[in-house]
Amino acid sequence: VQLQASGGGLARAGGSLRLSCAASGAIFSFNAMGWYRQAPGKQRELVAIITKGGSSDYADSVKGRFTISRDTAQNMVYLQMNSLKPEDTAVYYCNAKRSVVNYWGRGTLVTVSS
């Protein structure tokens, strides 16, 4: 399983970015897919997740600002990030879960300037 994340970059506070994750296999084969982030000196944390059935959940810190979505035909998962804040600065990782196994892509850096 390969996960390729893209779309990171530099944004100003209040701005938007859209992250994309391309999966090498059918995303329906995974129980869930999501986005995690890790800021310097901090532990990796869950940002958003979408289950096989289409349910989604978010970290409290991003609720109302971020939206996770998927395109099952293209095997893509997206994270639309609006109203960005400097504290959103982190490396963002795409994740896929199949049973008890987690798959990770290489991260994409998001930097939000104040």
Image (cartoon, grey):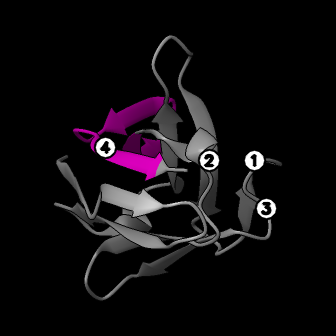
Q: Nearer the viewer, mark 3 or mark 4?
A: 4
In the picture, measured across the screen, residue 108 lies left or right of residue 94, that is left
Instruction: Specify whether 10 is left or right of 13.
Output: left
Q: Is residue 56 left or right of residue 74?
A: right
Q: Nearer the viewer, residue 14 or 81?
A: 14
Circle 4 residue:
109
* Mark 4 vs mark 1, CA separation in Å: 19 Å
Q: Secondary structure at mark 1?
A: loop
Segment colored magenta: 91-112
Q: Earlier in the sequence, mark 3 or mark 4?
A: 3
- Residue 42 falls left or right of residue 29: right
Q: Are marks 3 and 1 in contact (CB under 8 Å)?
A: yes
Residue 43 highlighted magenta (yes or no): no
Q: CA distance from mark 1 to mark 2?
A: 5 Å
Mark closer to the chain start, 1 or 2:
2
**From this viewpoint, which residue is outermost toward the front?**
114
Question: Which residue is pictured at 83% across the width and 48% down the height?
Answer: 60
Residue 22 locus on image (x, y percent): 23, 65
- Per the image, the residue denoted by label 1 is 59
Q: Quadrant of residue 77?
A: bottom left
Judged from this view, the residue extending furthest toward the right is 60
In what element is the residue under mark 2?
strand
Disc 4 to disc 2, how far (Cα)? 14 Å
Q: CA distance from mark 3 to mark 1?
A: 6 Å
